[in-house]
Structure formats: structure tokens, C-alpha cells
């Protein structure tokens, strides 16, 4: 198969690319194989096996126009892999050999759409402007399947190496839910399982890093407290079901229907001053009890409905891994009444074990791979306290010395700022290639230096340390 003409513009790696070409597209590569499962207590769960990678089954990427935010001098390629995932690749002019392999968040529900990778590349075009190649996959399926998404991303890395070039350095970048994918991916695909070290460093941004067994407790709590206050999801006239299922398998509800129910009860479609006193009182109760702003209620409710349905219907055998037995809520006008009246939901032990096996990081990211993370302190989607949970996970695995966490005063969940990410990448690359472990203070200084080229936006808080997750989300009984 012919190579894309990007090789005509990459002098330093022309020889390496030619070697890849001469090796032949049908050369045997190490199959995608996960390491042996980490022993755990609880019910047995089905073994997960990564799909084999067949180079001959992967069509060559096709040269295509770059999205609008990518520099005009870059070259872009698109394609669809053998599993059905769409992907996009961008290579800057005078590329020096660093690849950013991007794991996107969400996740999307339903069939993959090529437009997703275009949107991701536009959002993260700063990586290309900073001189790094970028590659991102839609994943071959929608839904909450962390290890399958990790395998799709690893497949794209191999496609890049097969058809574009073997990078000098590969940085695995996970954003939001994609950070949980990247954390598991760095554990599953290693020098031991792949045959060579696939990732030289890991960057986790706005990460949902508590694992599925802990990260979604707030959404379980929202479903329960919302129903206690609103009684319309489901309505009394509709069949009852366990709220931790999200929705029963096969039941359809549109996002517009759910939004209408939330607006009916809470008045989220209007300013606070235009809500009825009862609506505003319910909103304030949810804000205080769950410690999320009003603007985050509906997004969390969507996830706790439609993604929970995907999980219970397609990932955990028809049962729910989520529960709130033992959770004690506080912050309402009458906590005793709330705790007595809120629906109590039990996590199914087998579902819990299956979901944790797929989604919970173990912290066993092999040495010497360094991990650098960033989180907006007030992120209402992926709480800063989730990073404390991830720190504990890495420490228990003996990997904590290779984790540096940073936090910012300003930002959004979806994006913080261009100089923030440029600073993080520079610090991570120096750590990986030179052994210069960064400090939060050093990353902040790098960010200020990057503002001259990449614009304002540096608000690092080097002294910030997040509190334990249990200080924000009540603990509960777990299987």
C-alpha cells in the first residue's frame, strides 16, 4: 500500500519511514494483549481480551483537508479502522517526532461519527500549533466501555506508526472520560504486552479519575435526591423502576423529554429570579446536598439517565453497579426527612465487579512512564477530589512518585487554556526525555512564559491539594 505524501516533508524521519515501508504492510506485529488481570476480591468477572492487530487489515489513511483551527501548513489524514472507528491525524510542518495520541471524553452514545474527531482536533489544535503531531479516534462503538476504547486508541497508534512514521516520543493524552481510558490504556498496553514501550508519557486533563466504582456516585445521588424532590423521573403514572438502572433496557426517552421534566420541576430553563419559590428551593437543595452548581444539574442528570442505561443494559448484565445504601446526605432544609425519604438503591455485586474491572484504574502504569495531570479546581463535572482518589490509587500501586498533579483557578471542564496545555506538554516531555521531574511551581512558570506566543490564560495554583473524595461525595456501602 502506498504511504501518504507526508513523507516528502519530514526529513529527519524519512529513513525511518522508508524502513517501515520496506518491512511491508503485512508484517506480523505483536497482537494487542492485556497483562494478566490484577487479583481482586468479589465475584468473578469475564476475562477481557484485546483484539489482535492485523496490519494488512488496516487501510492507509487518506490525505484530507485540515479542520479550520489547524495551521494551514499542516498535513491531515483521515480514515476508518478495521473495527469501524473513525480517526483523524494532523502532522505539523517540520515535525520533530512527538505524537499526541488523544483519548476523547464523553463518551458518545450510539454509532461513531467522523465529525467527532474533527471537533476534537479543532479543540486541541494548540498541540499542532506547538509542533506536535496529533491523532484521535472516535472509538468503534458508543457507550461506557473503557478497555474497548483503549484498544481502539492503541490501534490508531499502530496505524500511525505503520503509515505515517514511528514517533520519537508518544504522549498518551486523555481528556475527561478519556482520561480514565488513558489511565487504563497505559496499564494494559506496555512494553511487556506490546513488545516495545508504546507510550513515553501520559497527560490527563479534566480527568474522571475515580474509576467507575466511585466517579459516578454523585450521579446516583442526583437521581435519588431529584426523585425525592420532583417525583417525575419516573412520574407516578409511569412504571416504576430502580433509578440506578438509568432507564430500563429498551425504554426510550429523548433528551428533550428529560429536559422538559427537569424544567417543570426546577425551572432550569429560566433565570433564578423567574423561577417559582418552590422551583428555586429545589434547585438550592440540589446545589447544597450534591455540591454542584445549577448549571451542572441537567448534564449530570442526562448522564445518570442515558449513560446509566447503557451501562446496566449493555455492560453489566442488566443490573446496576451503582448504589446509595448508607450514604448520609446533608445540606437540605430538613436532612432527617431527606435521608428517611430518599430512594435507596442497592448496587448489584456482580455488576459492580464487572464495571470496576473495566473502568477502575489500578495505578500499575509501568516505570519509567511519567504521568502529569491538570484539573480546574471548580470543575463541576469531574471534581478535583477525584484527583485525590487517583493519587491514592497510584500511591497504593507504588507509582505515586511518577505522578505530578496540577490545578488551576479558572477554566471549564472541556478546556482550560492554550498556554496551560503547552506548559504541561513541555514539562512532560522534559520529564520523559531528560528525567527532569516537574513541580507545580515550575509548570506555572512555564505557562507564564508560553503566554507571549499562545495568549493569556495561566491560573495555576501550585499550593492547592484536593481533599479526599469522601469529603465531597458521601461514602456508602459497596459490594
Image (tube, rainbow, N blue to C red):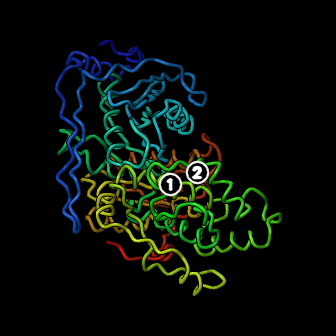
Task: Give the percent coordinates (x, y) of residue 202.
Answer: 37, 48
Depth check: 215 or 29 in front?
A: 215
Residue at 63 percent across and 64 percent down: it is: 232
Residue 416: image tag? 2
Along the horizontal axis of the image, is 276 left or right of 352? right
Compared to residue 5, the image places residue 106 above or below, namely: below
Q: Which quadrant holds residue 21?
A: top left
- 1 or 2: tag closer to the N-terminus: 1
Depth check: 228 or 392 in front?
A: 228
Q: Is residue 379 visible in this depiction of the protein?
A: no
What residue is disc 1 on? 206
Disc 2 element: loop
Tell me whether the residue at label 1 lies in contact with that at label 2, contact meaning CB atoms closer than 8 angstroms. yes
Task: Give the percent coordinates (x, y) of residue 102.
Answer: 43, 40
Q: Residue furthest bottom?
A: 336
Foreground mark, 1 or 2?
Answer: 1
Residue 40: image tag? none
Residue at 61 percent across and 80 percent down: it is: 331
Q: Is residue 312 visible in this depiction of the protein?
A: yes
Compared to residue 256, the image places residue 211 above or below, namely: below
Disc 1 element: loop
Task: Give the percent coordinates (x, y) of residue 192.
Answer: 17, 45
Task: Give the percent coordinates (x, y) of residue 109.
Answer: 48, 43
Depth check: 222 or 245 in front?
A: 245
Q: Which quadrant holds residue 200?
A: top left
Q: Residue furthest top?
A: 2
Residue at 46 percent across and 65 percent down: it is: 242
Along the horizontal axis of the image, is 99 left or right of 330? left
Along the horizontal axis of the image, is 157 left or right of 236? left
Amino acid at each position: 500500500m502506498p504511504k501518504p505524501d507526508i513523507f516528502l516533508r519530514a526529513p529527519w524521519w524519512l529513513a525511518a519511514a522508508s524502513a517501515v515501508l520496506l518491512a511491508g504492510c503485512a508484517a506480523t506485529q505483536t497482537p494487542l494483549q492485556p497483562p494478566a488481570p490484577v487479583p481482586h476480591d468479589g465475584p468473578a468477572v469475564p476475562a477481557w481480551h484485546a483484539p489482535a492487530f492485523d496490519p494488512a487489515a488496516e487501510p492507509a489513511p487518506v490525505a484530507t483537508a485540515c479542520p479550520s483551527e489547524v495551521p494551514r501548513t499542516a498535513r491531515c489524514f483521515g480514515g476508518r479502522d478495521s473495527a469501524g472507528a473513525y480517526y483523524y491525524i494532523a502532522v505539523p510542518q517540520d515535525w520533530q517526532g512527538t505524537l499526541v495520541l488523544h483519548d476523547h471524553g464523553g463518551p458518545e452514545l450510539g454509532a461513531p461519527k467522523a465529525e467527532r474527531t474533527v471537533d476534537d482536533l479543532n479543540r486541541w489544535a494548540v498541540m499542532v500549533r506547538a509542533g506536535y503531531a496529533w491523532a484521535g479516534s472516535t472509538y468503534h462503538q458508543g457507550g461506557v466501555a473503557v478497555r474497548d476504547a483503549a484498544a481502539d486508541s492503541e490501534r490508531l497508534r499502530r496505524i500511525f506508526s505503520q503509515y505515517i512514521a514511528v514517533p520519537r516520543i508518544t504522549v498518551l493524552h486523555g481528556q475527561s472520560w478519556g482520561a480514565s481510558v488513558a489511565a487504563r490504556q497505559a496499564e494494559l498496553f506496555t512494553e511487556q504486552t506490546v513488545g516495545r514501550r508504546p507510550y513515553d508519557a501520559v497527560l490527563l486533563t479534566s480527568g474522571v479519575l475515580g474509576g467507575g466504582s466511585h466517579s459516578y456516585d454523585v450521579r446516583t445521588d442526583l437521581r435519588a435526591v431529584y426523585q425525592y424532590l420532583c417525583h417525575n423521573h419516573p412520574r407516578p403514572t409511569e412504571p416504576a423502576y430502580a433509578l440506578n438502572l438509568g432507564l430500563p433496557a429498551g425504554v426510550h426517552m429523548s433528551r428533550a423529554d428529560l429536559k422538559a421534566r427537569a424544567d417543570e420541576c426546577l425551572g432550569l430553563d429560566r433565570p433564578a429570579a423567574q423561577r417559582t419559590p418552590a422551583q428555586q428551593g429545589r434547585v438550592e437543595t440540589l446545589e447544597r446536598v450534591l455540591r454542584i452548581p445549577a448549571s451542572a444539574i441537567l448534564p449530570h442528570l442526562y448522564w445518570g439517565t442515558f449513560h446509566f442505561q447503557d451501562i446496566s443494559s449493555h455492560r453489566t448484565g442488566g443490573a446496576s453497579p451503582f448504589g446509595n445504601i448508607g450514604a448520609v446526605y446533608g445540606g437540605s432544609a430538613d436532612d432527617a426527612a431527606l435521608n428517611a425519604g430518599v430512594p435507596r438503591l442497592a448496587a448489584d455485586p456482580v455488576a459492580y465487579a464487572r464495571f470496576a474491572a473495566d473502568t477502575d484504574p489500578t495505578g500499575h502504569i509501568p516505570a519509567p512512564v511519567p504521568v502529569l495531570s491538570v484539573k480546574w479546581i471548580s470543575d463541576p463535572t469531574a471534581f478535583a477530589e477525584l484527583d485525590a482518589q487517583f493519587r491514592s490509587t497510584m500511591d497504593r500501586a507504588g507509582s505515586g512518585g511518577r505522578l505530578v498533579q496540577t490545578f488551576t483557578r479558572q477554566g471549564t471542564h472541556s478546556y482550560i487554556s492554550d498556554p496551560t496545555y503547552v506548559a504541561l506538554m513541555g514539562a512532560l516531555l522534559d520529564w520523559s526525555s531528560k528525567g527532569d521531574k516537574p513541580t507545580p511551581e515550575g509548570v506555572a512558570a512555564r505557562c507564564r512564559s508560553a503566554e507571549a506566543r499562545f495568549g493569556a490564560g495561566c491560573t495555576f495554583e501550585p499550593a492547592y491539594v484536593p481533599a479526599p473524595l469522601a469529603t465531597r461525595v458521601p461514602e456508602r456501602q459497596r459490594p
